[in-house]
Image (tube, helix red, strand yellow):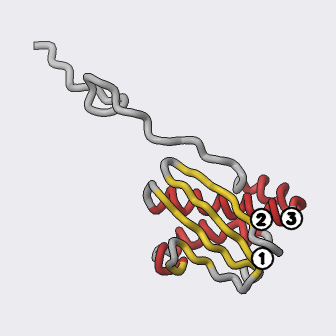
Amino acid sequence: MEIINAVGRRKSAVARVYVTEGTGKITINKRDLTEFFPSAILQYVVKQPLELLQVVEKYDIKANLDGGGFTGQSQALRLAIARALVKINAEDKKALKDQGFLTRDSRSVERKKPGQPKARRRFQFSKR
């Protein structure tokens, strides 16, 4: 099997993933998964598509993460891994789609408007 690559995005985070056959090692920005995401919840989010298809120990994953915060990065990585798994085996698409791992979450921060302190918040109104 050659190297399969995919891209995942969430908020302002971008994850580029390279999947090869291996022993289940996940490397993010040249660091181990547990070192990059110390939180067990974020590690769980990243591994969700692999655990769903029971292929955790089957593939080695190298990822480049850029932008955003740690939550957005973990969700971008999950989307990229799911897309790469579909490229490897198209029959897995239905299972991943049913769990929502192939859906790009397009919500991002609304821009700040002029004359207001935030996007929708107005300055306090004073009648007198």
In the depicted structure, whether residue 65 falls above or below residue 59 = above
Tell me if mark 3 has few (under 14), some (14-19) or many (20+) residues whose alpha carbon lies within 10 angstroms of its own. few
Query: Residue 118's x, y, as percent?
Result: 31, 33
Query: Label 1 amino acid?
Result: Val
Give left or right: position of 105 versus 30: right
* Element marked by disc 2: helix
Q: Nearer the viewer, mark 3 or mark 1?
A: 3
Q: Earlier in the sequence, mark 3 or mark 1?
A: 1
> What residue does disc 1 label?
55
The N terminus lies in which quarter of the figure? bottom right
Q: Which of 19 and 93 lies nearest the eye of the viewer?
A: 19
Numbered mark located on residue 89 in the image? 3
On the rendered structure, is 9 left or right of 59?
left
Residue 80: percent from the left, percent from the top?
66, 59
SS for dot 3: loop
Pick whichever of labels 1 and 2 is earlier in the sequence.
1
Give yes or no for contact between labels 3 and 2 (Cβ–Cβ under 8 Å). yes
Q: Which numbered disc covers residue 34?
A: none
Could you tell me which residue is drawn at 79 percent across and 72 percent down? Answer: 2
Q: Quadrant of the C terminus?
A: top left
Helix, strand or loop at mark 1? loop
Residue type, numbered disc 3: Asn
